[in-house]
Image: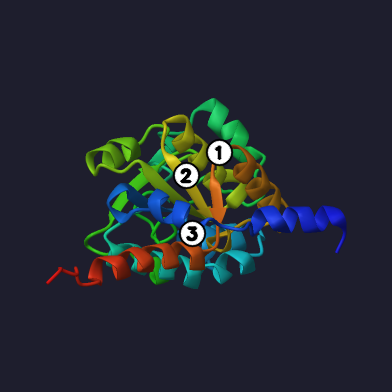
Amino acid sequence: MSAAGNAVDAVVNPAVDAQDLAERLRPDRTALILIDLSNDFVHPRGKAAVVGGRDVTHALRILPAAARLAAAARAAGAAVIHCQHTTLPGGAGDSPVWRDARSRASYSAEDICLDGSWGQAIVDELAPEPVDHVVKKYRYGGFAGTNLELVLRSLGRDSVICCGVSTNVCVDTTAREAFAREFYVTIPSDACASWDMDLHAAALATAERRFARVAAVEDVVAAWARRQGNRSQPTRTST
């Protein structure tokens, strides 16, 4: 591998300060945000694959890691929020600027993730549980025009974990929006994917240097397990 390749790999899979990560991801302050893991973006029969001809292999590969994160978050007491891309019937939420941007996305369709459709639904592997929260989003980021910040503030969360698809667009935009609103941001590199994994790596490299901590799913799960283990230790009393 070239020196440049090694440098990128070091940022995508950086060394993690376990103690810092454990504090940053304390369950009572943290929310896991699962972004756009909907049938139209991830499923082989979704519009990204069928209409846009996109290869969803990378997206499918992260589903077990994302599911593991969600299960670990619930067990630890962290909040789980599904950010669900939504197109309103009749294009009611589509401004001229948004339509122009969408026209340049080769995978897109005017009714991708149509509100209430199978395509908008979260994939079965990540189906929301009763304790989870679902936030519909109408642009790339999870905050613009949504109640995501209200939900986070109401839950007392100031630290977010952003994962899902695609790393360089919706995950990146949501992470930047969170940072701009004074949330701590962590991105698990192996629970994110892009149609172009070079763009995935570039997005993570920028995030790590500027506005987020990049870690592996294993690091996040271990941080929560460590805290749970500490809580379960009996308190010693002097005799």
Type of the residue with mark 2: Val
> Mark 2, residues whose alpha carbon is within 10 Å: few (<14), some, or many (≥20)?
many
From the image, which quarter does the C terminus lie in? Answer: bottom left
Badge 1 is on which residue?
211
Badge 3 is on which residue?
18
Q: Earlier in the sequence, mark 2 or mark 1?
A: 2
Residue visible at 36% across and 69% down in the picture: 225
Residue 213 position within the rendered picture, expressed as x and y whole percent measured from the top left: 54, 48
Among the 4 quarters of the image, the one containing residue 209: top right
Residue 44 position within the rendered picture, expressed as x and y whole percent measured from the top left: 56, 69
Residue farthest toward the left in the current orientation of the protein:
239
Badge 2 is on which residue?
185
Please, what secondary structure does the residue beneath circle 2 have? strand
> Mark 1, residues whose alpha carbon is within 10 Å: few (<14), some, or many (≥20)?
some
Type of the residue with mark 1: Phe
One can see residue 140 in this view: no
Q: Nearer the viewer, residue 67 or 46?
A: 67
From the image, which quarter does the N terminus lie in? Answer: bottom right
Cα distance in 3D space between marks 2 and 1: 7 Å
Please, what secondary structure does the residue beneath circle 1 have? loop
Residue 201 position within the rendered picture, expressed as x and y whole percent measured from the top left: 69, 53
One can see residue 234 in this view: yes
